[in-house]
Amino acid sequence: MDTTKIWTYDDLARLPDDGKRYEILDGDLVVSPSPSREHQRAVKYLLFGLARLLDEHGIAEVFLSPFDAILSPQRVVVPDLMAVRRERASIVRERGVEGAPDLVIEVMSSRPALDRVRKFDLYAKAGIAEYWLVDPIGQTIEVYFLVEGSYELAGYYGEGEIAQSVVFDVEVPLRDVFR
């Protein structure tokens, strides 16, 4: 008898509020430790910049973790940041974004393979148009754009450079992210 549980959003909703960050990746329950100081700083400064560029101009709404992206019943993720275009605001509900956001940003921490491999594939399968991988230690941002169902590198940005979004016509100076 197979005792492997396939987790769903309904199972996730029944878990106690214990302060841990839970995600469901293809039916597997994943628990993540609290992020590092560098991780939190990068998220904070990205949020400030993107909210100023997208929210304040009515282009998109930016969401900060913890806020679920419910891609399917067996795919529920909690990206560090995500943005949904105003014209697609109907996918934003009280419990989370129900469908593929236009942009997802993950700031890598203690388990980079989770963001670089597992979520990378999951986000492409879900149809998320743009995915940023942010490395707070190396102080780099990789911008990926979805082309025919898989991600292609649109830009790799390092010290002194300006990251450019493909989906949103915005630029984010790395000096503002890695202060």
Image (cartoon, grey):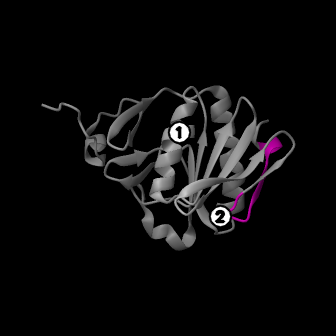
| 168 to the left or right of 26 | right
Whether pointer 1 and pointer 2 mark residues with C-beta atoms closer than 8 Å, the reply is no
For the residue pair 65 and 103, the one nearer the viewer reads as 103
Return the residue at label 1.
Answer: 117
Answer whether residue 71 is visible to the viewer in this image.
Answer: yes
Task: Establish if 172 lies above or below 45.
Answer: below
Q: Give the extent of the magenta segment.
A: 165-176
Q: Answer whether residue 69 is magenta in the image.
A: no
Task: Establish if 81 lies above or below 140.
Answer: below
State the residue at coordinates (44%, 69%): 90
State the residue at coordinates (54%, 32%): 113
Percent x, y of residue 82: 56, 53
Secondary structure beneath disc 2?
loop
Q: Answer whether residue 167 is magenta in the image.
A: yes
Q: Quadrant of residue 133?
A: top right
- Residue 167, numbered circle: 2
State the separation of the CA atoms marked 1 and 2.
Answer: 22 Å
